[in-house]
Each structure stands twice: as C-alpha cells, then as structure tokens.
Amino acid sequence: MAKSTHAAPARATATGPFGVGLIGTKFMGRAHSTAWGKCAQFFDLRREPRLAAVAGRNADETAAFAAKWGWRRATTDWRDLLSDPEVELVDVSTPNHLHAEMSIACLEAGKHVACEKPLAGTLADAKKMVLAARAAAKKGVRTFVWYNYRRCPAVALAHRLVREGRLGRIYHVRASYLQDWGGPDTPLLWRFQADQAGSGAHGDLNAHIIDMARFITGDEVTEVAGAIEETFVKERAVVASAGGAISGKGAKSAAAGKKAGKSTVDDAVLFLARFKQGAIASFEATRLATGNQNRNNIEINGEKGSIRFDFERMNELEWWDHTLEPKLRGWSRIMCTDGSHPYASHYWPAAHLLGYEHGFISQAADTAAVVAGGSPVVALPDFEDAFKTQCVLEAAIRSARERRPVPIRELDKF
Ligand SMILES: NC(=O)c1ccc[n+]([C@@H]2O[C@H](COP(=O)([O-])OP(=O)(O)OC[C@H]3O[C@@H](n4cnc5c(N)ncnc54)[C@H](O)[C@@H]3O)[C@@H](O)[C@H]2O)c1
C-alpha cells in the first residue's frame, strides 16, 4: 500500500516556526523556495516554515538567489546547515548522486529531510538512505520525498475515487511521461551523465508515473517484464554552466560548442509490470516525444469505471462511470477546482486554475503539518515509500539489460 508512515507525531512538543535549509538553487531550488515561502499563506499551519538558509556552489549567485527568494542566509558549504540550530529541516534539491550523502548527513545531525526524487541515482544509495531514515525515525526525525504530482487535485481525487471503490477491481494501468527537450541540441547536462543522474528519462520521468500509479491504485508492483531502453543521442556538447533550465537553454559551451562528450544514460525506457492485486501495467518515459512537452499521463481501467489524467491539462480529471445505465455512459471532464476537491479550497474560487507550483506549495504545507505532529491531506511519501518506486526503476533496468522478467522481491531485501 502506498501509505504515508507519518502517523505518529514528530517532536510534537516543539512550537513556533521551524527553519528550513535548502540545498540547490536552480530548477527545483526555485520551485521549493516558492513552496516554502507561500504555503503558510494558503494553509493554516500550526508551525510555519521559515526560510532560514540556502546552500549553493557560487557565492555571488547564492547570495543573489537568497535575496530574491527570501532566504535569510546564504552559504557555499551545505555542511553549514548541519550545525545551524535554526535549521530543523533540510531540503535536498541537488542532482541525484548527492541525495544519499547529503540526506544521510542531515538525518544523522537530527534534521528532518525533504529530498527530491528519485530517492537516489542507484538502488545501493537508496538502501543506505532507508537505513539512515529508520535510525532517525527512532528519534522523531522525519523524511519526505518530493513526488509532487500526488498533490495535483486531479491526481489526489483519482486516488480518493479508487479508495472509495468507484473503479472496482483494477485491470489496467497505462502510464506515460513524454517530454521532448532532449534532442541533439541539448548539451551534456548532469541529467545525461550516469554517475550523477543514475539513469536518464527513466529515473527522471518513469519515477513520477510509478509513484503516481502506486499512489492512485494503493497497490504495489510485484514484477517488471519486457523492458527496453534506448539512447538515441550518443554524444552531446560539453558545457561549462548549464544555465538553470532543464533543456540547458542559456548553457555556456566549454569550447564554443565544439567539444562533445558521451551521454551515458537512456533517452527513453518502456516496460510492463504486474501489480499485487492482479492489474497489469505499461510505463513509458522519453525526452524525445516531439510535440509532447510535459505530458505526464495516466489511465486506469477498472470494472466499474476508468480515469484519465494528463498533466498538460492538470486541472482536469476524466472519469467514465460504468455503473450508469448504458445510455448515460460517457467520459466526464471534472474540473478539479471546486472546494470539495483535495487542496482546491486552499487556493481560488472554482475554475480559477492552479499551476505547476501549487503541487509544491501543497507538498510544503503537508510536510509542515507532519513536522508539527499533524497529518497530510493525502499520503506523503517518505524514504521507505520512495524506496518501493526505486525498486521498480531498478527492476526495469535489469529487465532491459538481462532480457528477463524481474520480481521486486529480488531487490527489496536489506
Ligand atoms: N519533482 C519534480 O518534478 C522534479 C523536477 C525536476 C527535477 N527534480 C529533481 O530535483 C533534483 C535537482 O534537479 P534540478 O532540476 O533542480 O537540477 P538543476 O541542475 O536545475 O539544479 C541543481 C542545483 O544543485 C546545485 N548543486 C550541485 N552540486 C551541489 C553541491 N555540491 N552543493 C550545493 N549545491 C549543489 C547546483 O548548483 C544547482 O543549484 C534532482 O534530483 C531532480 O531529479 C524533480
């Protein structure tokens, strides 16, 4: 079951604001700064986050970032956060190979950790993180993972519809996450280097749809089969500075665009899977689906109905109610902005639409609720939960490389 383990209060005696320390100042650094800065305005929080300190790599850039986004202090050494008494929670928004080292050090220093996804670049790192989280949990220290799409009202509604039994037995999960920014003109960012990213589109995009499938169905993958991976663009231009955008727009080439380096990750991975309760599933992630910019899609077919979600129309959930008499059956397009929809009442009147940042704001609010000893609106993944997604990612890679079905039980032992 994709449940939150955040039932017990975390240091419930603490009161007043809690300090957040952020590591990373680019794409997710910006998204998370918005989230921490705005969540107490939209949600009534018992303990509000305070933007205590931000850690980056370049002193001038980090200071400018702190001034712009409201962080009180800037540092170029993330380890400063470990001894900062004002920081209660560290937000790890750095490339995947740094998640383990940073998260484990923070947990050992007694800080709650909210880490970006995927949990780690490798299964071995992810296991170390789970062990550190288990040790920290005994002292009331919490972990969180930014699987932000759970907090789109439409996705949270889909989860509730399944839990209410409205889809009945689930037969099919069909998920694809399609982007198109990874063509030959995109430089050799960290996202194309296996020693930093772990994998390419797979850990970046399949991670999200595996998490969403587990969250919406409340079920777990037991076996992966038939996976294939492909690297279409074998070499990319080497750059000195990536410019902040995922596409590397604004990147500065190290040698006027002449020097090329090898891409060591997949550009696309497709695989099939079985769920514990009998559903079968397909997953597809690519950065080369020309014309699909951020199409995070999931479709679930059950005996009593079906749902469809596409992030490019993130405010809508499509629902087919098969319990209606045949003459009334059809796809309904639910605008998930009514006060009765998860999270929507915290924002604007009906059909005053939400955007990308609202998922992060809602996640920061849920995280703050758990830090204060409360509960999230819908289940919030911790390291233990995100490890299950990591096992599915690893199973798909093994299935592709070894050309065989891979049971999850082969991977999830400690
Ligand atoms: N939840 C989502 O939808 C989502 C979207 C994009 C990225 N991500 C994840 O967020 C993480 C960061 O991705 P991003 O897109 O923000 O990358 P990015 O390249 O835009 O930013 C990475 C940041 O990490 C900083 N950094 C790197 N090494 C550092 C170090 N040693 N000390 C301090 N800072 C360091 C960089 O300076 C930069 O500010 C990744 O794990 C990625 O998978 C999640």
Image: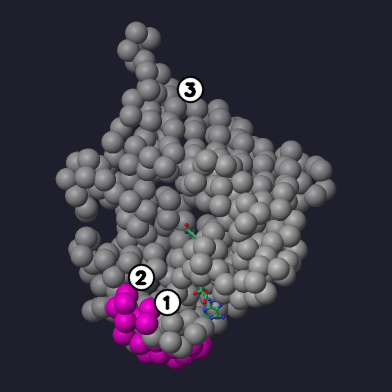
- The residue under label 2 is 33
- The residue under label 1 is 22
Picture coordinates of residue 207 (x, y %)? 57, 52
Local secondary structure at mark 1: strand
Local secondary structure at mark 3: loop
| In the image, residue 72 lies in the stretch drawn in magenta | yes
Local secondary structure at mark 2: helix
**Farthest residue, direction left:** 349
> Which quadrant would residue 307 be assigned to in this image?
top left
Q: What residue is shown at x 72% (from left), y 70% (from top)? A: 259
Q: Earlier in the sequence, mark 3 or mark 1?
A: 1
Q: Are marks 2 and 1 in contact (CB under 8 Å)?
A: yes
Q: What residue is shown at x 52% (from left), y 63% (from top)? A: 249
| In the image, residue 406 lies in the stretch drawn in magenta | no
Picture coordinates of residue 176 (x, y %)? 56, 40
**Farthest residue, direction top:** 327
